[in-house]
Image (cartoon, rainbow, N blue to C red):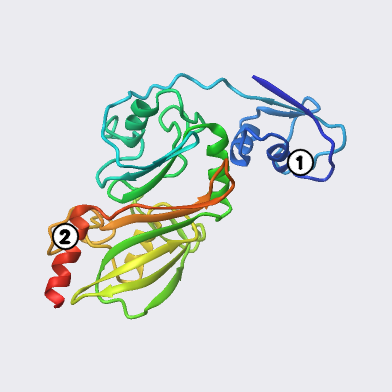
Amino acid sequence: MKKEYLSQEEGIRLDKYLSKVDGELSRVMIQKLIENKKVFVNKKIEKASYKVKINDTIEMEIEKPQETKLKPEEIPLNVIYEDNDIIIINKEKGMCVHPGNGNPDGTLANAIMARCKDSLSGIGGQIRPGIVHRIDKDTSGIIIVAKNDKSHISISNQIKEHLTTKTYIALVRGIVRENEASIDMPIGRSKKDRKKMAVDKDGKNAITHFKVLKRYSDCTLLEIIIETGRTHQIRVHLSQIGYPIIGDYTYSNGKNRFGIEGQMLHAYKIKFVHPTTKKEVEFTAELPEYFKKILEELDKKEE
């Protein structure tokens, strides 16, 4: 498929101009098209930084979406909310968001394919239809799924511009002294173990805010809000300052008196602007039963 535009502006970056005039593609997608030499200005390939001129002829070559190879699976989902544009799901711990190495099926993407069939955004590609953002396999909680491209672009842009508010609940090892604090440390791929992330001065900026909800004898319940969405951000930041999340085998030794496997981290709340109504909406996901039981045990011991 080919799209063509005659520039009516001057001095704007090519990627910014195209994202402004084309409501169907996000700026990230346009930048990928430019990188892949699928965008031409006056029949010539230009960089994303090229400044458009009046009457420039701009062409974009967009490949047709391929048929998804994802296998629909009838997997029960905890749906918090659904309309014609979005589905809000409370993902259980242990479920991958989309297929990857060692996880070809049984994912959230497989489940929503069965539930929604053809009514999903195709922007996420063959194995991520409708998936706007993700949380780790062993992190439970809120996920937004887009049912059309317009919604996908709207929410993706809000996330990119830090216009969404994501709130998490975590149980960490140790007694956190500060009632509230912020962690501002860049995160990048670990140079010692490529499967892990680490605080790295050459990494991408990452900001995490936390507030103590309750202190117990040897652990602390935190409410966490992230400004950025780096891979494993909360887990890396809390481990770096000496308060690893209980059950996190990657960023702590994983040993805990509760016998929990996988981090006690829950995506509790999300706030964003609805792509159609343009009104701010907020959704919360109830804590998993195992998480609530552990907190009940801790509360009893504190009585």
| Residue 202 location (% of width, % of height) | 50, 60
- At 84% from the left and 40% from the top, the residue drawn is 9
Kind of residue at badge 1 = Tyr
Which residue carries the number 2 mark? 293
Quarter of the figure that contains the C terminus: bottom left
Residue 8 visible to the viewer: yes
| Residue 174 location (% of width, % of height) | 24, 73
Which residue carries the number 1 mark? 50
Q: Earlier in the sequence, mark 1 or mark 2?
A: 1
216 relative to 149 in the view: left or right: left
- At 28% from the left and 30% from the top, the residue drawn is 105
- The answer to which quarter of the image holds residue 49 is top right
Q: Which secondary structure lies at badge 1?
A: loop
- The answer to which quarter of the image holds residue 291 is bottom left
113 relative to 201 in the view: left or right: left
Residue 190 visible to the viewer: no
